[in-house]
């Protein structure tokens, strides 16, 4: 499944994923945003992986925020933007 979200005044967030046994799987977040350090992208993918497919945007946002190490900077996107892209992929 594939979902995209263009952040108003920001960047494009793309999420590709599958659903296996009612859970989000094979999650890959990408886009034209910037993330410092870039390795934090793996933490975002891992935070979403395994969540129930029916998770609310608020739950997805919270999982991402909790998984990000302190000091990570997101430029042109946010955990909310990733949650929107996830929801669009599932629609």
Image (spheres, rainbow, N blue to C red):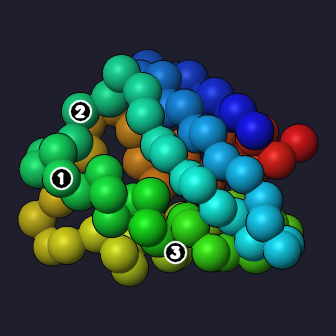
Whether 85 is drawn above or below 76: the answer is below
Quadrant placement of the C terminus: top right
Quadrant placement of the N terminus: top right
Q: Residue at image x 78%, y 59%? A: 19
Disc 1 secondary structure class:
loop
Whether 67 is drawn above or below 90: the answer is below
**Front tag of 1 and 3:** 1
Q: Determine crowd level at label 2: few under 14, some 14-19, many 20+ residues with C-alpha closer than 10 A.
A: some
Relative horizontal placement of residue 61, taking residue 45 as reference (left or right): right
Residue 55 visible? The answer is no
Q: Earlier in the sequence, mark 2 or mark 3?
A: 2
Which residue in the structure is indicated by mark 1?
Answer: 39
Q: Residue at image x 64%, y 28%? A: 4
Task: Tell me whether circle 1 and circle 3 mark residues in contact (CB < 8 Å).
Answer: no
Query: Which residue reaches farthest right?
Result: 91
**Front tag of 2 and 1:** 1
Which residue in the structure is indicated by mark 3?
Answer: 62
Where residue 48 appears, x then y in whole percent? 55, 65
Which residue in the structure is indicated by mark 2?
Answer: 34
Q: Determine crowd level at label 3: few under 14, some 14-19, many 20+ residues with C-alpha closer than 10 A.
A: some
């Amino acid at each position: 499944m594939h979902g995209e979200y263009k952040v108003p005044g920001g960047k494009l967030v793309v999420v590709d994923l599958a659903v296996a046994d009612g859970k989000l799987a094979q999650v890959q977040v990408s886009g034209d945003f910037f993330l410092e350090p870039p390795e934090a992208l793996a933490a975002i993918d891992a935070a979403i992986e395994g969540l129930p497919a029916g998770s609310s945007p608020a739950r997805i946002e919270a999982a991402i925020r909790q998984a990000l190490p302190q000091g990570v900077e997101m430029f042109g996107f946010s955990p909310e933007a990733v949650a929107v892209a996830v929801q669009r992929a599932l629609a």
